[in-house]
């Protein structure tokens, strides 16, 4: 019916606490709550492992995926025109971002 996973967002130590996820459902499995169940499981697992943020990379033409991520609390964090190519067609890329935890140490500064 589909799959869900997350892994490293970028190499190097700077983003070690950020993961990128993928959720895929076959069309007949969509709109049944399975995507939300998979997302909830991914977010819970990422938090349990101590990750701080989760990124979703979505094809610019996939308005349903953007709406789904927004319902799950993700915010748009980036838009890259024509950075992907599939079947001879250029695709835009939207990055969606979710903070998994709130920092408890206010002495840390955003960089």
Image (cartoon, rainbow, N blue to C red):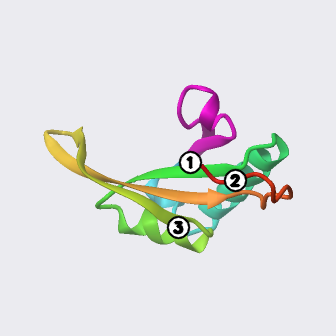
**How much space separates mark 2 and mark 3, taking CA atoms?**
21 Å
Q: Residue furthest top?
A: 12
Which one is closest to the eye, mark 2 or mark 3?
A: 2
Instruction: Give how far across and how far down residue 60 sits, in percent.
Output: 31, 59
Point 81% across, 40% down: residue? 49
The residue shown at (64%, 63%) is 36
Task: Please tell me in which quadrant of the rendered image residue 87 appears.
Answer: top left
Residue position marked by numbered label 2 in the rendering: 109
Nearer to us in this view, 75 or 4 = 75
Part of the protein shown in magenta: 1-22
- Label 2: which secondary element: loop
Whole-Å distance between the Cαs marked 3 and 1? Answer: 27 Å
Give the mark toward the camera: 1 or 2: 2
Looking at the image, do the residues carrying marks 2 and 3 touch, with CB atoms under 8 Å apart? no
Tell me the element at label 1: loop
Residue identifier under label 3: 75
- The reply to whether discs 1 and 2 touch (Cβ–Cβ < 8 Å) is no
Q: Quadrant of residue 102?
A: bottom right
Is residue 3 in the magenta section?
yes
Marker disc for residue 70? none
For marks 3 and 1, give the one nearer the viewer: 3
Label 1: few (<14), some (14–19) or many (≥20) C-alpha neighbours in 10 Å: few
Name above or below for residue 60 compared with residue 55.
below
The mark found on residue 1 in the picture is: 1
Classify residue 64 by image quadrant.
bottom left
Q: Is residue 48 above or below residue 96?
A: above
Q: Is residue 14 magenta?
A: yes
């Amino acid at each position: 019916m589909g799959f869900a996973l997350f892994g490293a967002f970028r190499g190097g130590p700077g983003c070690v606490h950020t993961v990128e996820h993928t959720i895929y459902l076959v069309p007949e499995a969509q709109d049944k709550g399975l995507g939300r169940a998979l997302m909830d499981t991914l977010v819970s697992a990422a938090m349990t492992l101590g990750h701080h943020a989760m990124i979703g990379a979505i094809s610019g033409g996939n308005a349903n995926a953007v709406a789904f991520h927004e319902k799950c609390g993700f915010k748009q964090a980036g838009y890259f025109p024509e950075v992907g190519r599939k079947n001879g067609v250029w695709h835009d890329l939207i990055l969606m971002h979710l903070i998994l935890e709130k920092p408890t140490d206010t002495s840390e500064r955003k960089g």
